[in-house]
Image (cartoon, rainbow, N blue to C red):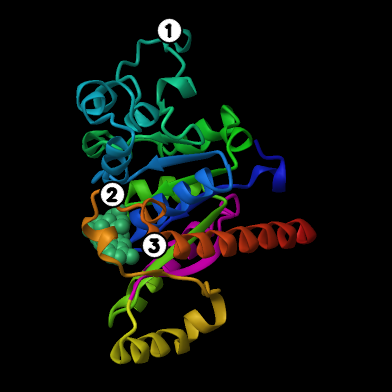
Amino acid sequence: MTTHNNAKNVISFINMKGGVGKTTLCLSLAYQLSMEDKKKILIIDMDPQFNATQTMMEQYDLVDEYLNKFRTEKSIINIFKRKKSLTNTRSSEIELKPEDTIIKSTINENLDIICGNIDIIFEDNNQDSISKKRLDLFIRKHKLNEYYDFIFIDCPPTISFFTDASLIASDYYLIPVKIDKFSILGVKMLDNVIALMKEDPENKVDCLGIVYTMEEKQKKLESIKDLFEENELIRDNYYIFSNTMPKHNHLLSGSKGNIAYNYDDTRGDIRSLSKEFLRVYFKEGEQNEECS
Ligand SMILES: Nc1ncnc2c1ncn2[C@@H]1O[C@H](COP(=O)(O)OP(=O)(O)OP(=O)(O)O)[C@@H](O)[C@H]1O
Ligand SMILES: [Mg+2]
């Protein structure tokens, strides 16, 4: 349970570029912090591809339960679903409680998940202005940010209702970046999305930094990385984590899923990264408190 920083602990893992390691970093950091640091963490899978959910259901041996029950009865959809009928009175609506949507497991009692679901794309999400705020409202109403040390949101790679809803609910965001010729584009697009969002003074999401993922020691990539870091937008605005998530085959095709904590070869990297993550997070919190 946290009392830190007025419980400003909802963090989106986001980049407008696909396949850069967002989900892998989100899950790996969540696993590491929950297992070794005993932090209580909630993962929210906002991506209709529901990759985080698939990995976590395998970890928790809940694949059948997901397919037979959670998918239809206990997923992120519950938070966004509203009754269509206008004749329903408010009191007749059954209020959604955290236990109606959060999945827990004794395999790791410090790490819970709100499962994603492909069918969320069929929800009529843009009809009213409150829709995008539903995740934020759910978290705050039930004080989930006080119950958990961190809430990590795994975001899809496209500008969409889901990324907007994630960012509105978030206090911070972290940008996983895979270095290649187009890395800058994903960050630039995200920068524009955030700038647009911040036109509404109620939206106060801050960036914790950029984390390099699938890092490879190659001369050519090093020079692309230098160009990325010399870019004015990056140089002047973004902290770059000194620890990285190196490329490792286990995280691509290992039998224990794309969770760095699960492999001897990758645990050291995620441990160092998680220590830096905590340092950066607590420092950000102190700075924000000084400013307010
Ligand atoms: N450090 C790594 N080393 C090797 N493979 C990795 C690493 N990180 C991620 N991968 C693999 O790369 C692929 C893409 O990773 P991941 O799903 O985490 O990216 P993503 O940004 O979440 O993708 P999407 O935009 O589709 O949500 C996956 O197959 C994953 O297993
Ligand atoms: Mg993903």
Q: Position of residue 16 (x, y in %)?
A: 33, 63
- Label 1 CB-ligand 2 distance < 8 A: no
Q: Which one is nearer the viewer's eye here, 25 or 156?
A: 25
From the viewer's perspective, is 198 left or right of 269? Answer: right
Q: Residue at the spot x=58%, y=65% of the render?
A: 276
Q: Residue at the spot x=32%, y=92% of the render?
A: 219
Q: Position of residue 97 (x, y in %)?
A: 48, 20
> In whole angstroms, how far apart are the C-alphas of marks 2 and 1?
43 Å
Q: Position of residue 38 (x, y in %)?
A: 58, 42
Find disc 3 in the rendering and name its residue.
Answer: 266
Q: Quadrant of the N terminus?
A: top right
Q: Are marks 2 and 1 in contact (CB under 8 Å)?
A: no
What residue range appears in magenta?
A: 189-215
Residue type of the residue flagged with mark 2: Gly
Which sits earlier in the primary sequence, circle 2 or circle 3? 2
Residue type of the residue flagged with mark 1: Ser
Disc number lying in front (1 or 3): 3
Could you classify mark 2 by the number of other residues whose Cα lies within 10 Å: few (under 14), some (14-19), or many (20 or more)? many
- Label 3 CB-ligand 1 distance < 8 A: yes
Location of ligand 1 given as a quarter of the image:
bottom left
From the viewer's perspective, is 153 left or right of 140? Answer: left
Q: Residue at the spot x=39%, y=35% of the render?
A: 128
Q: Are marks 2 and 3 in contact (CB under 8 Å)?
A: no
Q: Residue at the spot x=41%, y=40% of the render?
A: 44
Find disc 2 in the rendering and name its residue.
Answer: 257
Q: Quadrant of the C terminus?
A: bottom right
Is label 1 in a helix, a strand or a loop?
helix
From the viewer's perspective, is 245 left or right of 274? Answer: left
From the viewer's perspective, is 62 left or right of 233? Answer: left
Disc number lying in front (2 or 3): 3
